[in-house]
Amino acid sequence: MKNYINIGLFGLGTVGKGVVNQLNDNGSLIKKRLGREIRITRAVTANPDKERGIDLKNIQISNKINDIINDPEIDIVVELIGGIDLAKSIILQSLKKGKSVVTANKALLAECAEEIFNAAYTSKGLFGYEASVAGGIPIIRNIRESYSGDKIMEISGIINGTANYILSSMSEKNETFLSALKEAQEKGFAEADPTFDIEGIDAAHKLILLMNLSFNAIFDFKSLYIEGIAQIEPIDIEIADDFGYVVKLLGKARDDDKGFEARVHPTLVNKNSILASVNGAFNAVQVMGNFVGETLSYGAGAGSYPTSSAVLGDLIQIGRALSSSDTSSPPPLSFQIEHLRKKQILPIDELETEYYLRFTVLDKVGVLASLTKSLGENNISIRCMIQKSKEHVPGLPVAVVILTHIAREKDIRAAINEIDKMPIVTSPTRLIRIDP
Ligand code: HSE
């Protein structure tokens, strides 16, 4: 046996550089824990000659994928290039050759779950993907190992640091959406294409991964309801605050009597709840098991070092298995492969929750009556309401916000559809779901 674990690294971007730096700094400590050194001998990147400002000595760098895949001496392939097609090909080829793989690629794992996990289950190599969800929070390991004696009933949380950073800045510092986004990008939280963060797609990738892991299933990513934060305006944050709520981008999935409910969207959470105090780029994931009860894991969910730390954790775990006579490890999705099933997510129309509805209407006689009549006819019961306008200027639009009791999404949509056609409505109604 070599006295080191040999790593081939794909990608020298934000996380790849973090992995190199962390190994440079903590290498001797890691060797004492693992019993062998972890050594990156090869790296593949699109721009091998680019100056990266980190110590890359002893690493052979090229832009040829096969330099790593065909090197029989590489034990673990680390995939940190992101994206779907090329990353998939690298991972599948590596697993086929019996190499172990560590990846942070939630988009790939969520959208091509069946293909990738089948390959991971059947390969001689081991598979680690802790870095794909919530950066430095070991949530994959918690669910796969620590809670493997529980039936998981619910997962929910703040799983996109960029969106949380933006919403926190808008709320705490009255920042505009764009300046908060710019700051998040400068700090390295945002994806290369921030649309994924803002539109909720990144959070959705992570939620599907957590669902697959928790509910012994493969869910179709395309069937998940996703709504981003781009529609949230300062007025929503201000009115939510008046009512005792903060706006958070939540991912939530539940296994209940009717089936699997799952969704990613901006949500009003009570200011007194734990999730309300999770600010900036921090993530928090709540898992509820039928015996463990409620649990909460909190930490930095994005950025170079929290993510590289998760990569290193996987490398050490796999390194330990490769160093022992028992090279098995927990099944990648916790369940044995023969028990994994394809499962469906309930349509969003069947959701039942409380709603915040912001109507933009002309301030004139009978307007409220028209709104409440339509809500009533659609089985929607009103909990409270407020009208926001500095002064009464007949003919100018005002914001009327209504909070509902628990209602069905289908009824809410029917009512909004009806109301938005009324001549008194000057802009489309905004809806934010409330976490009751
Ligand atoms: N862009 C992600 C986020 C980090 O903001 O949470 C990587 O998952």
Image: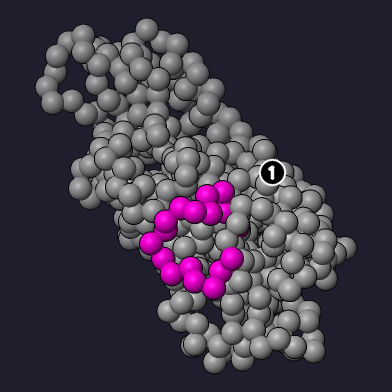
Tell me the amino acid under the disc marked 1: Asp
Q: Residue at x 49, y 54 (%)?
A: 49
Q: Residue at x 50, y 18 (%)?
A: 417
Q: Residues within 10 Å of mark 1 (few under 14, many from 20)?
A: few
Q: Is residue 406 left or right of residue 292?
A: left
Q: Residue at x 35, y 24 (%)?
A: 359
Q: Is residue 310 left or right of residue 425?
A: right
Image coordinates of residue 91 in percent, x first then y, are 72, 57
Question: Which quadrant does the N terminus fall into?
Answer: bottom right
User: Is residue 207 among the parts visible in the rendering?
Assistant: no
Image coordinates of residue 63 in percent, x first then y, are 61, 52
Q: Is residue 298 above or below residue 408?
A: below
Q: Along the line of sight, which residue is nearer the eye, 208 or 322?
A: 322
Circle 1 SS class: helix
- When asked about the image quadrant of residue 150, the answer is bottom right
Q: Is residue 50 magenta?
A: yes
Q: Residue at x 30, y 37 (%)?
A: 178
Q: Is residue 226 magenta?
A: no
Most prominent secondary structure in the magenta stretch? loop
Task: Tell me the residue that label 1 is attached to.
Answer: 85
The stretch of residues the image draws in magenta is 44-60
Image coordinates of residue 414 in percent, x first then y, are 54, 22
Q: Along the line of sight, which residue is nearer the eye, 163 or 398?
A: 163
Q: Is residue 313 above or below residue 108?
A: below
Outermost residue toward the right?
A: 338
Image coordinates of residue 250 in percent, x first then y, are 47, 50
Q: Is residue 369 left or right of residue 353?
A: left
Q: Along the line of sight, which residue is nearer the eye, 80 or 183?
A: 80
- When asked about the image quadrant of residue 411, the answer is top right
Q: How many marks?
A: 1
